[in-house]
Amino acid sequence: MAALVQIGGSSLVLLVVFYALHKVTDRYFVRSLEMISARLKLTSDIAGATLMAMGSSAPELFTSLLALVKGAEFGNLGAGTIVGSAIFNILVIVGASAMFKTAVLSWQPVIRDMVFYIFSIMLLYWAFADGEVTMAEGVVFVLFYLGYLALLPVWRRIFPYADQPGIGAAEIAAEEARLHRKFRPITRWMAPVDRVFDAIMPDLERHPGQYWNVFALSILAISGLSWVLVEAGVVLARALSVPDAVIGLTVLAVGTSVPDLLSSVIVARQGKGDMAVSNAVGSNIFDILVGLGLVWIVMIGFYGQNIRIGTENLEGSVFLLLATCAALLMLLVVRRWRIGRRAGVVLILMYGVYLAVTVAEVYRGGPVSLG
């Protein structure tokens, strides 16, 4: 009976936190970052790879950090969340976006980001192979990301392509209102959460000059919600008697990717599916290189010792990441850089297979960890 109460309670907490993360990230954090980006006059590539990636990946970043703060033995929970989120981003976010409207992509940025994503996965394998992460490995991850940023303008000069048009705030607000009406039964129950954040956060529509305050408050809110997410995830894992990494790879990975999913669906419905694909791949690069690398640097520097990581199924996790990347790239090449409803269905079905295999491993008693 106690286990059932723990499962029900932690599941309810997770649902509320997932909704709150979406609210904070999409309505406040990302909008404040858009204003900061405009004020700094960043190009679309640089803004997307830095501030926008930070916005969409903030839940994964803080979950990874707070999982390690809780203790080195929980490292697989945070890292598993990032790996599971990477799989969800490629298969579900891209797949769901393609279900709304066929998108014709520019091959130049797709190839660039795919190549860096593949190298990021290989770096992940290199860092985890010996079961221990060092400060030097964390530094290499961050330096590789900085190299990615430095390549953006160079790549664009070598392989020119048209800039992606953005979406206005009015269009985003209208689409969010439509989704709010469609899911009214859920949003009605979450109304107290809306009222709390509306009371705390400055209204950027009325007071646009408050974007730095909104940015700071959003960071505090996301960090607090991520802490609750980690605690609830650990309780759920204990109640279900499954490894922490399983909760990270599945439940937390999906939950922390909800802001990305909804944002991508919004832009896809506006006929800009190319932005959804770019966001999914770019977020994965940020998650792995910064979401793990920067966190390792901070935690090793603070505690003065390396971080132990499980390696029982490392090859399997790396294979899954590479397989999702290869599947998307193959679909795009075969479809001549067009992605539509059929491709979307295939990608979502592949995610269903991934979940089924992960759950089967648990019930079979096989080793399921980040690796």
Image (cartoon, rainbow, N blue to C red):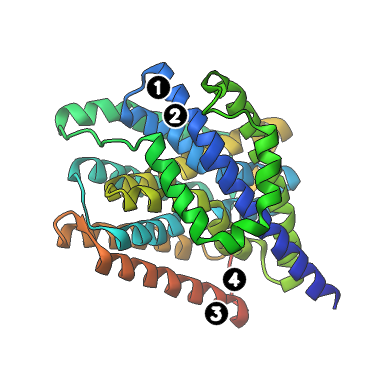
> Hey, what amino acid is under mark 4?
Pro
Q: Quadrant location of residue 246?
A: bottom right
Specify the quadrant that holds the C terminus: bottom right
Q: Quadrant location of residue 1?
A: bottom right
Q: Which residue is labeled 3 in the image? A: 360
> Hey, what amino acid is under mark 1?
Ala
Distance of mark 3 from mark 1, alpha carbons? 47 Å
Q: Which mark is residue 125?
A: none
- Residue nearest the observer in this picture, 233 or 322: 233
Q: Secondary structure at mark 1?
A: helix
Q: Secondary structure at mark 4?
A: loop
Q: Position of residue 263 (x, y in %)?
A: 43, 48
Determine if residue 67 is in view.
no
Q: Which residue is labeled 1 in the image? A: 38
Q: Quadrant location of residue 248?
A: bottom right
The answer to whether marks 1 and 2 mark residues whose Cβ atoms lie closer than 8 Å is: yes
Residue displayed at 45% across by 71% down: 354
Whether residue 210 sits left or right of residue 322 in the image: it is right
Determine if residue 109 is in view.
yes
Q: Is residue 282 above or below residue 340?
A: above
Q: Which mark is residue 34?
A: 2
Q: Which residue is labeled 4 in the image? A: 367
> Hey, what amino acid is under mark 3?
Ala
Q: Position of residue 280 (x, y in %)?
A: 39, 49
Residue displayed at 56% across by 75% down: 359
Q: Secondary structure at mark 2?
A: helix
The answer to whether marks 3 and 2 mark residues whose Cβ atoms lie closer than 8 Å is: no
